[in-house]
Amino acid sequence: MMGRILLVEDDIDLLRGYEQDLKTYNFEVVSVMDGEEVIIELKKYGSAYFQAIVSDSELVELDGHAAVRRALEYQLLDLDKTLVFGMSDEESNQQYWRGIANYGCFYNKGRISDNRLGSVVFQCLRNFRSGGLWRERMPVFS
């Protein structure tokens, strides 16, 4: 197993496709459809259970980036041990992930529709584990 991923996506068709794509890279996938469920899963299993959180930006109840920030506030997540990978239909939504998502770990769902999520997550997680650039978080601009 390459690692355990908490996948957060509110579109059921995309969710199923992403699950299959990640599983082809030997990831174990736990899927949820809202940010509130991220908090529930982290409370249930603890932060060390997931090697990465792969989350859509815009969700129905609690957006993905807001859920990660809340998990950090509640001390349910350690950014030194868990890769945070943001996704969105809009490149402009990267701004919401600044300071929490790992550098270079953002998936533009609007441009990439060829089942490459597994490959991109695999590369980011491998580099994160080796201590490379992906260990750095996206910079925060004022």
Image (tube, helix red, strand yellow):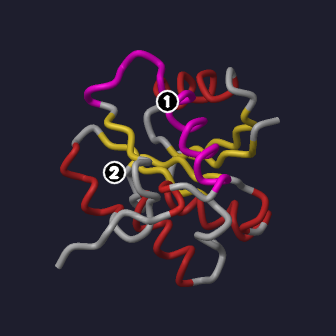
Mark 2 or 1, nearer chain start: 2
Residue placed most toward the observer, 36 or 98: 98
* Residues at discs 2 and 1 in contact (Cβ within 8 Å): no
- Judge left or right: residue 140 versus residue 37: left
Check residue 82 for magenta coloring: no
Residue 106 place in picture, x, y as percent? 39, 46
Q: What amino acid is found at the position of numbered circle 1 in the picture?
A: Leu
**Marks 2, 1: nearer the viewer:** 1
Dot label at residue 117? 1
- Pick the residue in front: 115 or 60: 115
Which amino acid does the dot numbered 2 rest on?
Glu
Density class for disc 2 (Cα within 10 Å; few <14, some 14-19, many ≥20) is many
Q: What residue is shown at x 36% (from left), y 52% (from top)?
A: 57
Q: Residue at x 46, y 27 (%)?
A: 14
**Residue 86 location in percent, x, y?**
42, 50
Does residue 126 sit above or below 115 in this rendering? Answer: below
Q: Quadrant of the N terminus?
A: top right
Label 2 secondary element:
loop
Q: Compare residues 136 and 68 and report the one nearer the observer.
A: 136
Label 2 to label 1, Cα distance in Å?
A: 17 Å
Residue 126 percent coordinates (x, y)? 64, 43
Residue 116, magenta (yes or no): yes
Q: Which residue is mark 2?
A: 58
Question: Which residues lie in the magenta part?
Answer: 110-130
